[in-house]
Amino acid sequence: MGGTELEGLARRVRAASREVARASSSVRDDALRAAADLLVNDPSGVLEANRADVARAEREGLGSAALDRLGLTGERVTQMAEGLRAVAALPDPVGEVVDGWVRPNGLRVERVRVPLGVVGVIYENRPNVTSDAAGLCVKAGNAAFLRGSSSARTSNMAVVAVLRRALAKVGLPEDAIALVEDTSHETAVAFMRLRGLVDCLVPRGGKALIASLLEHATVPYVLDGDGNCHVYVDAAADLDMAESIVVNAKTQRPGVCNAAETLLVHADVAPGLLARLRTSLSEVELVADERARVHLPGAAAATEQDFATEFLAMKLAVGVVDDLGGAIDHIARFGSGHSEAIVTRDLVAADRFVREVDAAAVLVNASTRFVDGGELGLGAEVGISTQKLHARGPMGPRELTCMKWVVRGEGHVRR
Amino acid sequence: MGGTELEGLARRVRAASREVARASSSVRDDALRAAADLLVNDPSGVLEANRADVARAEREGLGSAALDRLGLTGERVTQMAEGLRAVAALPDPVGEVVDGWVRPNGLRVERVRVPLGVVGVIYENRPNVTSDAAGLCVKAGNAAFLRGSSSARTSNMAVVAVLRRALAKVGLPEDAIALVEDTSHETAVAFMRLRGLVDCLVPRGGKALIASLLEHATVPYVLDGDGNCHVYVDAAADLDMAESIVVNAKTQRPGVCNAAETLLVHADVAPGLLARLRTSLSEVELVADERARVHLPGAAAATEQDFATEFLAMKLAVGVVDDLGGAIDHIARFGSGHSEAIVTRDLVAADRFVREVDAAAVLVNASTRFVDGGELGLGAEVGISTQKLHARGPMGPRELTCMKWVVRGEGHVRR
């Protein structure tokens, strides 16, 4: 795909975005429900396309985890449809009057929530991201400009074809959901540089994608970053509660960004807590600093690198600190600004942790695993931002909108 | 300045930012008031430093407008102090609970406004930006990491020395306001790439700075963009009101980003309005499309380029459109997303314009000149953002903050 061809497609998507922005929420929601119906009533086209992708991936020797992410079944297609219906049922973020006031001269000022316009999404090989991302974009009044992976290309084309049919059914332009079919790296870079045509880019991928984005992007973007999350167990913690939170944060789903990677324990409770965890974390590989190893015989010595690593596995780094300040300093040094938890019954300690720890989410007496759009009540999630600008933490449909100032006068001129 | 030296300074600023974030708003405001007192009570150091900059700039043949921006007088230093006091008097954005709710499982969720951390500002040769920007950063609980121009280097160093003395007076770390004294392009580029050390970069400069930022920056930034602003006079406009708004928007201060650059007139009222404007805009150079020129004898033909240009001068492009849709399309094509105004008594037209025009600010029956932090009630302004992410339109202290999720449980774990 040449740069001109990509730009031409982007211009069509942009024109379509104006029509989506004008559409009422009932029309946008109808589009999502129509897409869900099409997927459920006739999944065969999507499943057939997916079989071709899977067969090619098998020939090319893709790993089993990646193959699992790539593969669709009738049930998974139904889940995609259910996801679209769930998003359709959420409240519309567009049109919310965020705040407003009247100036002394009588000018009436409002800030109103409006769609971003064209939202770009670059993502890897799960075909369900195609419908999830497109659904959230249209929900919030945006056009979705998608660029998936080469391994899922045929599946993505089939899903997008269904979504576009649904748009047409409700009278919205098909180009409000468009897929860049060229999956080359060059086209991905060109995509990141469509300044003026793409209003916001949401990358959903690994470190290589993020690095490429930081280097090349000229369009605005929202990063979904790493989660090197900590649980700090304070001197005043209830140890039963601490044990259950640590076990949950580490083991309930270790491969996700809101799982805990490091446990910090106040020296006063280290003997008691670590003795319990030796048993309850017996399935977890522990690496520990010198003071923690006293209570964790058999744990390997943790390196600086261990404390800086998002294991995404049944592995936990453990450190003992002298006090709350030590925990806060450790988190400031090693944390990735995702989710940080304290377990304590001490109100002063809880308040200080909440105030001084710099992260998208801080938790008191709760597992880091709750930092998720669904769990926190956003209904659906575009991703979890670890950046500070625009969106921080779980991003729902609202984070795919922006604000517009509306100023009303009666012939006001400035003196 | 080597990259290591810059990074070392950035780390000190970052450490200081944690202390500013912890400080109460009364301490932060005291710092700004102390700086104001120091500037007013002994402006001699700043004025002397500024004389050295001005003398060098004169030797180097700097233009008179630039010399005027660079030069300080006792009165201008007093204005800098008054600016700091005005910012100190604004409400503190930090700590605001933006929203919150309780989840069905009892988890209590809040989103709380917190400082960004380290705010970088790259700016050109007005030394007053040094105190304005630093004041707004500290107001919002941030450290200010400043990089001014070479022409104002000595002045900036003197102003920063005063600001740092004020920080020390109230017990805040001096490194919470720091100036990069090396004004080379290489260091500016290195500054834009301090990812992880600078939380938000606010460029205040021209097109070359923005282009460099888009190419090189890895830190998050908020752009203060061009204003190619339109006034559209609808068929249902009051022509007296339309005339006064057009004249105000174009001529009250033509060199700023919220001045109007293009007038669009509905064909029905073009003869009447343009006949009036021939007189009331007699000081303004008019370039017009074919239909407008019928009523503006003597106006040159407007090119496509004219409609795309932010003149920042007593020059106005004029076009006649068939209807509101024509105006909206013209603005979608040529507007820069800054401020767009409609003059009309027709409610349907006003509502459609407000809804369909994609800009930071849309105005009904008011001059574009009102799109300004002071005029809209923000108290002070960091700049006017034409981007959609994070901040759009005038940015006050609140736009120098971000959100943090605070989640409180009683031992909650995820199932």
Image (cartoon, coloured by chain):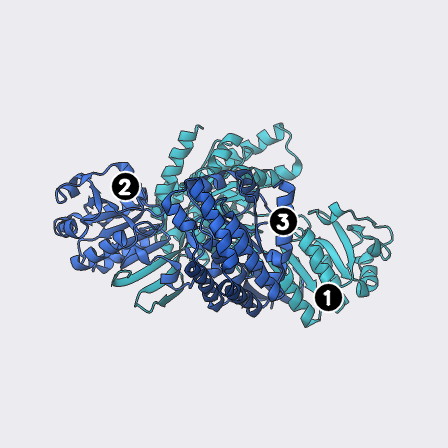
Chain colours: A blue, B cyan
Name the mark on residue B241.
1
Tell me the crowding category of disc 2: few under 14, some 14 to 19, or many 20 or more residues within 10 angstroms, Cα based: many
Tell me the crowding category of disc 1: few under 14, some 14 to 19, or many 20 or more residues within 10 angstroms, Cα based: some
Q: Position of residue B64 (x, y in %)?
A: 66, 37
How far apart, in angstroms, are the residues tagged by discs 3 and 1?
42 Å
Up-down: is A301 above or below B140? above
Q: Amino acid at mark 1?
A: Met
**Residue situated in front as seen by the camera: A210 or B306:** A210
Q: Secondary structure at mark 3?
A: helix
Q: Which residue is mark 3?
A: A9
Up-down: is B220 above or below B64? below
The total of numbered circles placed on residues is: 3
Q: Does the residue at mark 3 contact the one at mark 2 (Cβ under 8 Å)?
A: no
Q: Position of residue B355 (x, y in %)?
A: 62, 64
Q: Amino acid at mark 3?
A: Leu
Q: Secondary structure at mark 2?
A: helix
Residue in view at x 55 percent, y 68 percent: A30
Quadrant housing residue B89: bottom left
Name the mark on residue A307.
2
